[in-house]
Amino acid sequence: MKRTIERSTVDVFELARQGRAVEGEFEAAALERLSSLLTPPAGRIGFHLQGRIDEWGRNAATLRIEGRLGLQCDLCGARLEWTLDESSGFFFVDDEAHLGALPITAEGDEPLVASPRFDLQDLVEEQAILALPISPRHPACEQRTRGAEQQHGTSRPFAALRSLKRGRTDIQ
């Protein structure tokens, strides 16, 4: 069983060099930025951070976060149990200057400024926030909405434009 952690720091340089892992749990309600987005009971977030050296010889790690969080359905307003299950890769740089000099890429591991006292709680909280759905909805609520859209013909907003275009000869 994972232990609940109040606040945790780790030396990510040593974690990566030794290929070690650290794991634990945080109470989602204790994560200030995340808890404002959740519905009580908020739930718990388990994490597993595995240190490694990546293919370019950089200190790196893979973070996996899991949990069941309480959200509010955007359609009906009721509580929604949402499963969090995400994995992300990171590589570590020495300082902000190095971080700022790196090109921005959409793929691959994300760069982070490393420290011998790297804050795991902040990383876990940030990744959980990024993983949240933009508009959480119960599957049944989503189906009702789609059914209503199809019934009213709103599921294909450009269909009406297409039919207007077909009748005109001056539009290419």
Image (cartoon, helix red, strand yellow):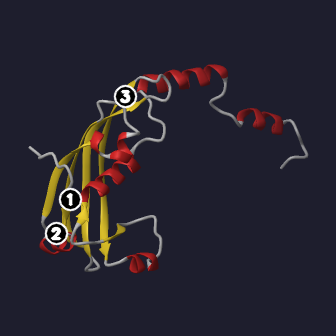
- Residue lying farthest to the right in this orientation: 170
How many residues crowd around disc 3 within 10 Å: few (fewer than 14), some, or many (20 or more)?
many
Q: Quadrant of residue 22?
A: bottom left
- Give the number of the disc on residue 15: 2
Question: x and y percent of residue 126 in the render?
Answer: 36, 53
Question: x and y percent of residue 88 in the render?
Answer: 31, 58
Q: Which residue is drawn at 38% across and 25% down?
A: 79
**Front-most of residues 158 and 64:** 64
Cβ–Cβ under 8 Å for marks 3 and 1: no
Type of amino acid at the residue the image marks with label 3: Leu
Type of amino acid at the residue the image marks with label 2: Leu
Query: For mark 1, what is the residue?
Result: 49
How many residues crowd around disc 1 within 10 Å: few (fewer than 14), some, or many (20 or more)?
many
Q: In this view, does 158 lie to the left or right of 146?
A: right
Q: Residue at x 21, y 72 (%)?
A: 116
Query: For mark 3, what is the residue?
Result: 80
Q: In this view, does 22 lie above or below 28?
A: below
Question: x and y percent of residue 139 in the render?
Answer: 42, 27
